[in-house]
Image (cartoon, rainbow, N blue to C red):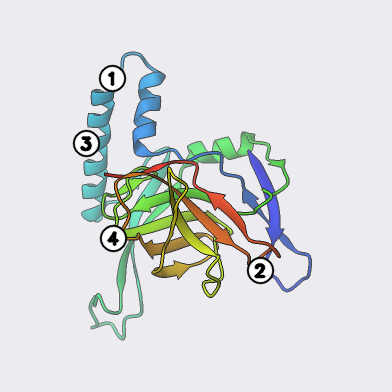
Amino acid sequence: MKYYLVDNPLTVEPGDCMARVETVSTITREKLIELCCDQNAGFNHSMVTGLFDRLEKVVVKAAADGKTIVTPLGSISASISGVFDNAADSFDPDRHELKFNIRTGHLFSKVAEDIKPVKVNPRQSGINIVSFFDHASGTTNDVLTPGSIGELQGNLLKYDDSDEQQGIFFIDTQQIATKCSVVAHNAGTKLMFAIPSDLTAGIYEVEVRTGLRTKAIVQGRLPAKLTVS
């Protein structure tokens, strides 16, 4: 496992750094199913997909019923955040929020003990786009739905929205770039935006261009290609 150091904005000491793990790739649900089939010839795709479907439904229902799920991979439990005025007060969705908490289990703790992290230099551009989530289709690194909400996860994604050269761009196979004009969340690790509604059917790459940390504009692209049907 590789890591690199960046400035630590949480401390006041100059020169303090924090580590970021270099993401190799993103493993989706479909990829997990494929890996399960690859490692055991006795499992076929439909069988593993069915097991995943059933497991997800059972876990979600158990959590919704207020049960705590504990497995070697991790545990899931519910909690409620917010302040209650007094003992007679009741849950109010405008003031309180029901959340599900996930904690890693002992399998990950054991693996963490065995891994020896290796320090590397940060990527030249600094931009690392890990994943794209299409809210309309509910897919990751796959479908692109014009007019829907898109979400990018990664590192050093924030850009100066007052500069026309910076932003989120969708690039087609002819290398024509279409810029997102509506961005709701512009932060270092996440961008949320309206996917341009005028994208036509075809294959696209998503690119982030920023100049916040460098004198020149630098860009980073999502490794996966996205499809507009």
- The disc labelled 4 sits on which kind of residue? Gly
Does dot 4 land on a helix, a strand or a loop? loop
Mark linked to residue 101: none
Q: CA distance from mark 1 to mark 4?
A: 37 Å
Q: Residue 92, percent across and down?
A: 24, 77
Does residue 34 lie above or below 209 as drawn? above
Query: Which residue is label 1 attached to?
Result: 44
Q: Nearer the viewer, residue 73 or 217?
A: 217
Looking at the image, which residue is at 56% across and 59% down?
A: 209
- The disc labelled 1 sits on which kind of residue? Asn
- The disc labelled 2 sits on which kind of residue? Pro
Mark linked to residue 54: 3
Query: Which residue is label 4 attached to?
Result: 147
- Crowd band around label 3 with a 10 angstrom C-alpha radius: few (<14), some (14–19), many (20+): few
Q: CA distance from mark 1 to mark 3?
A: 16 Å
Query: Which residue is label 2 attached to?
Result: 9
The mark that comes first in sequence, 2 or 3, is 2
